[in-house]
Image (tube, rainbow, N blue to C red):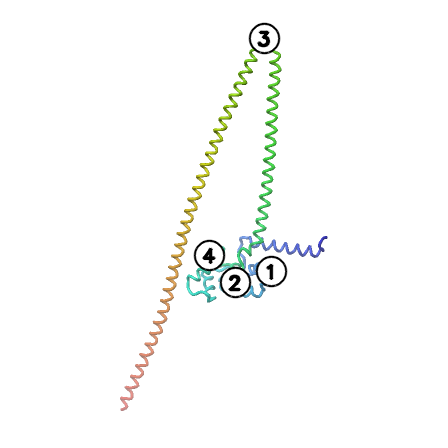
């Protein structure tokens, strides 16, 4: 039974809206904060119970750190926002939180990344329908291409087979005609034809034997070549994996060293700032005490002069 026309129109509108949002999200252009918020609501509001005013509150806070209204936060802006949450104590913890939120690893945080973190949604949840659609489209394209290649290969095979069958039939026809003509010969010509046929038979047998031997050698050479190629590829893959693992280990060690160095620098700057403030307080207190002592000294001198 067909759905009412108004329901079909509504479903078409929803499908069109979803397609527009998916195309927008897959695009390369910079996305405004408002568009990102609307897309997040489009993806999660209906199923997750996320209220619009909650997203707007998070958006307002996020935009207060977005200098220039870029639609994303540079690392220093994001670090200030994370620090304002008062959920971290050290620079290292701030760095860890930034890396956790920056799921695209592009060194900045857009509102979609931040909203996913705040509302406990994964990046995979945000892209699931899009990835399914992309995979479905790719699968259809691959199937159509494979079908076309199969049809083309089948056509080529049938044409080659037909040509081979025609060539074989033509050779057999010519051979029959030759034998029929030779059967009519007599005397010396018949004897010559007989010996010629014997020679042809011997040559054909020798050619067949030689072809089989060549084919055996060819197949062996191909198997040997394939085996050597597989061994080389396996060795190259192993060496590549070992090199990548070593490079990754060095990169992690270097990153750890840099983070430790940054934390040490951060703590040193923090300590220096605290010492500077403390020194200023002490200097101010010493100055106040000196002025107080000077005042008391002058007052005592005034009383001594009166006496």
Q: Nearer the viewer, mark 2 or mark 4?
A: 2
> Disc 2 vs disc 1: Cβ atoms closer than 8 Å?
no
Pointer 2 residue: 118
Cα gap from disc 2 to disc 1, whole angstroms: 17 Å
Q: Nearer the viewer, mark 3 or mark 1?
A: 3
> Disc 2 vs disc 4: Cβ atoms closer than 8 Å?
no
For mark 2, give the secondary structure. Answer: helix
At 41% from the left and 54% from the top, the residue drawn is 252
Q: Is residue 184 left or right of residue 246?
A: right
Pointer 1 residue: 47
Q: Nearer the viewer, residue 158 or 145?
A: 158
Cα gap from disc 1 to disc 4, whole angstroms: 31 Å
Pointer 3 residue: 187
Image height check: is 137 above or below 123? Answer: above
Q: Is residue 49 left or right of residue 264?
A: right
Pointer 4 residue: 107
For mark 3, give the secondary structure. Answer: helix
């Amino acid at each position: 039974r067909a759905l009412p026309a108004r329901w079909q129109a509504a479903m078409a509108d929803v499908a069109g809206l979803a397609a527009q949002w998916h195309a927008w999200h897959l695009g390369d252009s910079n996305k405004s904060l408002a568009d990102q918020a609307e897309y997040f609501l489009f993806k999660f509001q209906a199923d997750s119970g996320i209220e619009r005013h909650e997203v707007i509150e998070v958006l307002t806070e996020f935009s207060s750190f977005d200098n220039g209204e870029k639609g994303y936060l540079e690392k220093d802006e994001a670090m200030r926002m994370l620090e304002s949450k008062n959920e971290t104590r050290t620079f290292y913890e701030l760095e860890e939180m930034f890396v956790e939120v920056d799921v695209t690893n592009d060194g900045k945080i857009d509102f979609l990344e931040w909203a996913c973190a705040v509302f406990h949604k994964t990046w995979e949840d945000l892209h699931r329908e899009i990835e399914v659609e992309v995979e479905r489209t790719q699968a259809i394209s691959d199937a159509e291409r494979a079908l076309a290649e199969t049809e083309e290969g089948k056509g080529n095979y049938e044409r080659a087979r037909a040509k081979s069958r025609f060539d074989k039939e033509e050779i057999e026809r010519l051979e029959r005609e030759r034998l029929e003509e030779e059967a009519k010969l007599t005397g010396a010509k018949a004897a010559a034809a007989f010996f010629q046929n014997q020679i042809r038979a011997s040559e054909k047998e020798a050619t067949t034997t030689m072809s089989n031997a060549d084919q055996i050698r060819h197949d062996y050479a191909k198997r040997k070549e394939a085996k050597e190629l597989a061994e080389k590829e396996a060795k190259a893959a192993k060496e590549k994996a070992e090199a990548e693992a070593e490079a990754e280990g060095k990169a992690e060690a270097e990153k750890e060293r840099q983070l430790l160095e940054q934390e040490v620098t951060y703590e040193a700057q923090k300590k220096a700032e605290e010492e500077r403030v403390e020194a200023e307080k002490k200097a101010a207190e010493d100055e106040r005490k000196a002025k107080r002592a000077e005042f008391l000294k002058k007052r005592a001198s005034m009383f001594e002069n009166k006496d």
